Image: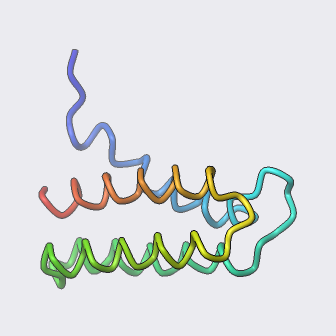
């Protein structure tokens, strides 16, 4: 059995929710510098779905968000995994 794009799509929203949930902190201590990025990712997803972005702009924005989050997070491994996964799913969304 192979997965199709639509089988994976709910993961995008779940990953954004994970980033928003206490700023992806395993300790449960909110990181107010990280979880606001969830709304930025949601806005970006809306722009993708409305076909308002080029692939170049999308990739640049995703890299920028990842760099910014990496600078402020207290959970670098956790947030890096989340942002890498978001990057993958956003590109799949764009290509759909």
Quick check: 24 above or below 62?
above
- Of residues 25 and 16, which is closer to you in this image? 25
Q: Quadrant of the C terminus?
A: bottom left
- Count of labels shown? 0
Q: Within the image, what quadrant is residue 61 found in?
A: bottom left
Quick check: 66 above or below 84?
below
- Of residues 65 and 36, which is closer to you in this image? 65
In this rendering, position of residue 60 left or right of residue 78: left
Quick check: 48 above or below 95?
below
Identify the image's colour scheme: rainbow, by chain, secondary structure or one colour.
Answer: rainbow
Q: Quadrant of the N terminus?
A: top left
In this rendering, position of residue 75 left or right of residue 96: right
In this rendering, position of residue 86 left or right of residue 50: right
- Of residues 29 and 94, which is closer to you in this image? 29
Q: Position of residue 43 (x, y in %)?
A: 40, 81
Q: Position of residue 34 (x, y in %)?
A: 65, 74
The residue drawn where x is 43% and y is 47% is 11
The residue drawn where x is 12% and y is 58% is 95
Q: Position of residue 33 (x, y in %)?
A: 69, 81
The residue drawn where x is 33% and y is 48% is 9
Q: Within the image, what quadrant is residue 45 found in?
A: bottom left
Task: Return the residue found at the far top.
Answer: 1
In this rendering, position of residue 48 left or right of residue 77: left
Quick check: 85 above or below 57?
above
The residue drawn where x is 18% and y is 84% is 52
């Amino acid at each position: 059995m192979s997965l199709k794009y639509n089988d994976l799509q709910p993961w995008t929203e779940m990953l954004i929710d994970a980033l928003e949930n206490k700023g992806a902190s395993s300790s449960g201590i909110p990181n107010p510098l990280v979880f606001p990025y969830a709304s930025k990712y949601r806005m970006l997803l809306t722009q993708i779905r409305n076909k308002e972005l080029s692939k170049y702009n999308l990739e640049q924005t995703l890299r920028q968000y990842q760099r910014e989050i990496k600078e402020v997070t207290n959970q670098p491994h956790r947030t890096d995994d989340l942002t890498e996964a978001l990057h993958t799913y956003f590109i799949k969304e764009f290509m759909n």
